[in-house]
Amino acid sequence: MFKEIFLFEIKYRLKRPATWAYFGILFVFGLIVAIGGNGPASEKVFVNSPVAIATMLNTISIFGIMLASAIMGVPVYRDIEHKTENYYFTYPISEKGYISGRFFGSLTTLFLVSLGLHLGLIIGFMIGPYAGYEEPERFTSFNFWYYLQPTIMLYWSNFFFAGCIFFSLVSLTKRVMLAYAGGAILFITYLITLTLTQDIDNKALVSLLDPFGFGTYRNIIEYWTPEEQNSLMVPFKGMLVWNRVLWVGLGLIALLYTLFRFDFQRFLSRSYRTKKRKNLEEDTKGSAIHIGIPEVAKVYSNVLNIKLLFKLAIIEFKNIIRDNFFIAILVAAVLFLFFDAWFGFPIYGTPSLPLTYYMLEVKDFTYIILIFVLIVFMTGEVLHRERNVNYDQIFGSLPIPNGIVYGSKFLALAFVSFLLVNLILISGVFNQVIKGYFNFEFDKYFTDLYLIEFPKYIIFVMLAFCVHSLVSKKFIGHVIAIAIWATLFGLNSFLDVDNNLYLYGYAPGYTVSDINGFGHFGTSLFWFRLYWLTFGAILTLLGFLFWKRGTDSGIKARLQIARGRLKVSTLSSIILLVIIWLGSGAFINHNTKTLNNYRTEKAGTIASADYEKQLSQYYQKAQPKVIDVKVNADLVPEERRATIKVAYKMVNKSDETIDSLHLNWGGPGIFHKKVEDFKIDGKTPVLGKKYEAFGYEIYSLGKSMQPNDTLVMELKVTGMFNGFPNEGSGSDIVYNGTFLNNNFFPSFGYSPESELTSDQDRRKYDLPIKDYQLPPQDDEWGLQNLLFNDDADYVTFEGTVSTAPDQIAIMPGYLQKEWPENGRRYFTYKMEGDLDFFYNISSARYNVHKEVWTGKNGEKVNIEIFHHPTHTYNMDRFVKGVRHSLDYFAENYGPYQYRQMRILEFPRYSTFAQSFPNTVPFAESFGWVGDFSDPEDLDYVYTVTAHEVAHQWWGHQITPSATRGSNQISESMAEYSSLMVMKKEYGVDAMQEFLKEELDNYLRSRANESKFEKTLLDNDNQAYVWYRKGGLILYALQDLVGEKNLNNAFRSYADSAAFRPKAPFTTTKEWYHFIHTATPDSLKYYLEDSFEKITLYSNKTSNATYKQLENGQYEVTIDVQSGKSHFDGNGKLLGSPEQPNVLEIGIFGEDVKNDLGMTVKLPILLEKKWVKPGESSFTYTVDKIPIKAGIDPYNKMIDRIPDDNLIYVEEISE
Amino acid sequence: MELQIKNLNKTYSNGVQALKDVNLTIPQGMFGLLGPNGAGKSSLMRTLATLQQADSGSVTMGDIDILNDKARVREILGYLPQEFGVYPKISSSNMLNHIASLKGVSNKSERKDLVESLLNKTNLWHVRNKSLGTYSGGMKQRFGIAQALIGDPSLIIVDEPTAGLDPAERIRFHNLLSEIGENTIVILSTHIVDDVSNLCSNMAIICLGEVVVKGNPSDLTKGVKGRIWKKGIEKDDLEEYQSEMQVISTHLKAGQTIIHVLSDNRPDSTFEPSKANLEDVYFAEISSRMERITD
């Protein structure tokens, strides 16, 4: 019996077009991804590497839950839907046979359908190398196991457990909607585990709970290098096993429960589904019939029609908000809204205050996706409302004009949209209240929600309306509408189509800021909204013409109806809308393309390639160097414009004759520059050659410059913004919060910074692969120039700046005077001594907080914090950061070179902090509004301030040469310095948390490396190496050789290299030399491992036990495994040396809180040991009861599994 | 006012020709539209009820062009479709009130009186506040007629209203229909011959999209008077009879098969004359057009 039902199910399914449609979709998807090489593989990973295949299968299985619900939800429901249950169940079949037959038949179908993806991928990967979308080298040979293993382990197991749950839900409740709701719940569970991932301490929890095993899988492979991703399959062990046991087991339990619980009679009884119905009593007297019907007046007028419009709309709106599906999705959406806002916006894991703009931004997280779905589905419901309950014929023949019916439905959706935007407000305010934040800023809420977001939802509604009107089958309408959105999203995300003019509903991004409010984004938003609203209205009217009223769905009849509806008024509205649409489109195009040089990403890549091809001939061409800068800047933030005049005094420091000056303005962008005046030594120079596309100009100098000759270049430039761009914040000059730097002016000569770096791009555009951006440490040119800017060595600086009367403008140096003139506010600054050629000009309505730091030798430094008036929350943290930094660095590295240290706030159009000489700008969202109330959260204001202040030494005093590895001298040293300030403040036992973050970041980043990982001595562009690895290695080094000892070496280095007046400038060779002097010979292996090689440890504590001795002490035995391996830059194993290494062995009590409230370790015993690779055992006797013990407990070494270093100690009884 | 249907044609997109050159003049009073399933009755009615396009032809009622001036048609129309649903969670009185407002009855108190009288008339008063989802088939059907009567329609179209009703309900429904309008055009479609003979003063038989016969039911019955013969036969002999004479219907009576034959003369002495009724007219017309009709 099982067999017949099973086979019937499969045969039935194979005849259904939907089965083949699902198969086809997966097949085509696989084909496209495989041929296009769009899979989840970085440049050095084969597009069909085992990890890439497994990731793809895993990802698709998550979206495949919809497929599972569609296939596994219906087999039992089918009998209800087609009303066959009444006789089908009377056949001599058993419940178990029925259930298991239907289940396994459907499951087999599901598995077969799911193989469409494999087929697509396999064929695609065979075609791929010849198709030309991806380089043939990126494809490896076919391996059956790469598909089979993850299919069973992740892909099918996900389908199985999801299928079991959907099948059971429907079989037990008869409600097919529950299958979809179940799908939504699983997806939400997945998203929640994603949120948990933010904290690396939750890794194990995520690994267990992620219903799709995606997080589990990712936690396993996240540190895998390209080499490993190309050759290894994910092992089925550890957490992955438990995860699968949990979820597959859950599915199995649901299935078994259904199998034993299912009962035909119960299934048939109505009360099971709905409340018991009471049959109404019939009143049989027939006399009532003879009652007359009163005469009534019938009125048809426009006024009444309008009334009717609203009446119908309100009824429709009520219908929508009573819909269970709507409520379910809405509840989920609001929960996301709330929790996204609740957990949202952490920086380094530390939450931010619930500012209004944060509350608003969550609308674009998960909420918007659910809104898409809601709008599409609800539009379908509304347009099919009458048909659904079979009331369409009566309704269709009522004397209500078409426009009123259609209009009322549209209006109802508009009401829904309005409700949806208000939920954002409610959730936001609710969040703020709970968190005790009462600065609600309703003006921001209203502007953003009613003027910007609401029209966007209406635009969504319009498309859905058009689709559902044209397509008379509701389900197909849903599919098409969702497919349109998916296509738009795909075009935008994967095919780099980013012109907002061609993507329905899209508009430039905008950022709300406390400093600059909605800034200048209003104009472009207005035009884009107008453009899409008119287009949407055209679609809506088009939908109106074809909208089905009545029963005729033939094409001919609908065309006929459309012709009938195309009255003069409709036609003229359409024409008017088309005119506005095209007009606004043309205006937008003029703004984005003509005024703001919009180009596609590909065009940008080609331009970079051409730049290099045409101009690299000028690379390293000698140019005079700036030695003195005088600036005269007139900022007009009100109009987003600035006119700045500079006078550069320049010297020919080379030993060649220079006869031309190369001005490199960079290619055309959205910040437009106009040269007002250009003079060299008082004369206007002659333009020799100009590369328009790259903004590269060559002027011949009237008189050639001999070595050591000087000249004065005067340049007056107006910078401004015209119209609005397709994308981009244009944050250089804004109404409040201007942040300009020396890039306002051209640089001199060819700069390789704008070259393409990706190997793949370079090959594609016939450029040689470039392994390094910078020349080697002994390169003559490299030694002659400084890393950050080859246009100058050190300069002297003074200048005057004017700005709006209510703003404060800031430049490098000390304020000389400040005065009002012509309704503007003027400031003159002058720097004492030298600075590297790196300055900024800022202006905003600031409040200033001032303090003074006094050093050990009585030297005084003014600490000035320029901040937005309301952003006073974390002022003390900035000040503390500066103070502690100055304390530590002045003592250990040498004196601070200036008498002031300024911290500036700038708007949140980007999130970073940067160190200029004596000035550190911090973005608005970076620290100023952080919520540091929990001492366990990282106080990144403090640590980043320390890092940036450290750059005043490492970068601005010791400014390295333009050679490989130089970034380590500024960034690794700053990171190390920051860690040392933290260590001093928090105590050494609190450091493990921070070190582990650095380690995690380093390991994850190197796994995604698209070229090859570089060593500390040679690295020229890998931030994760110079920050994360650099910080860790130097921290561990001071731990090995002694903090004071190492700092003394750094101090000697600083003495030798700071403000070096002449080339050759310092390199990593010199730096490394000083590090060597602090390191005894026995530990030199560590330097070699860390600075010259890529070395990873695999330390692990396998066993730790203790027993109490008779004297009350405890004897602790620790069994450890240690390993150390060298790898090449691609992650290929080079060897595992057998020599012992110095590693820490520790025994700890229970963690305690320090004075600041942070959880810290409580060491009972800590000892450095020479540990040989392999297994070792250590025994200690300690006084206190041991809780945990292990090897390298503070994660000082680079170890891929840091969590198994320290384990709980178990007591063994005698 | 008469309803004039001229040369009406309709072919569906799947190729089925639902209406073939239909010509009908429908006077005021009850008009019966008789025909087998799939004859085109519903197509014709939906076309009159503005729910469907015609390919060609014209339909007028007074100065109203029914096919093109849909808005005006809807103002004078009362329509009860063959199958219809209701919003299950709303009460009949609320729903009728809502429909009345949609039909242009804008005065609130007038609307209230109207709804009340309709509820009384259709015998739904006692359940007026119950939600429609709880109604029995008969109640639902009466609700259907109540909504069709709103707004004093001068054209009422009811499509197979008695299908699925029990005999008592059917009688009640007939009474209701006969109450309305001498001054209105009521078009009733059905495949139950008795409905038409009981209620209608005019009728048409429609088969395979064509009007095959039209006129007054009793006149039509007269046309076959004296030409209908019946005989009880063995079931196995049916085929033989069918090949020899025009057997218009067969039915069972007490286990015996009775055939009706249309013939100007008595086929042979074993046949008895049968009293002609509308049913014989109906079967006579369609038996020649369709395959065997078995009752």
Image (cartoon, coloured by chain):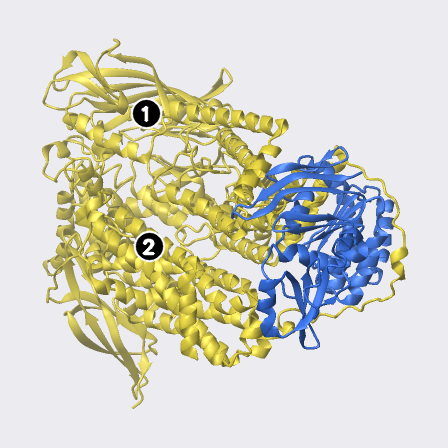
Q: Chain B shown in which color? A: blue
Instruction: Give residue A601's quadrant in the image.
Output: top left
Q: Chain A shown in which color? A: yellow
Instruction: Return the residue at label 2.
Output: A27
Q: Measured along the vertical axis of the image, is residue A889 above or below residue A105?
A: above
How far across and how far down the image is residue A1173, in percent?
A: 15, 69
**Residue A216 in sight:** no
Distance from the alpha carbon under mark 1 to that under mark 2: 43 Å
SS of the residue under disc 1: loop
Instruction: Return the residue at label 1.
Output: A668
In the rendered image, which quarter contains the N terminus of chain A? bottom left
How far across and how far down the image is residue A582, in percent?
A: 48, 26
How far across and how far down the image is residue B149, in percent?
A: 80, 49
In this rendering, position of residue A1186 left or right of residue A973: right
Residue type at mark 1 is: Pro
In this rendering, position of residue A1059 left or right of residue A877: left
Most distant residue in the top direction: A683
Give the residue displayed 79% in from the left and 51% down from the top. Answer: B219
Q: Measured along the vertical axis of the image, is residue B109 above or below residue A708?
A: below
**Residue A359 in sight:** yes
Q: Residues within 10 Å of mark 2 (few under 14, many from 20)?
A: many
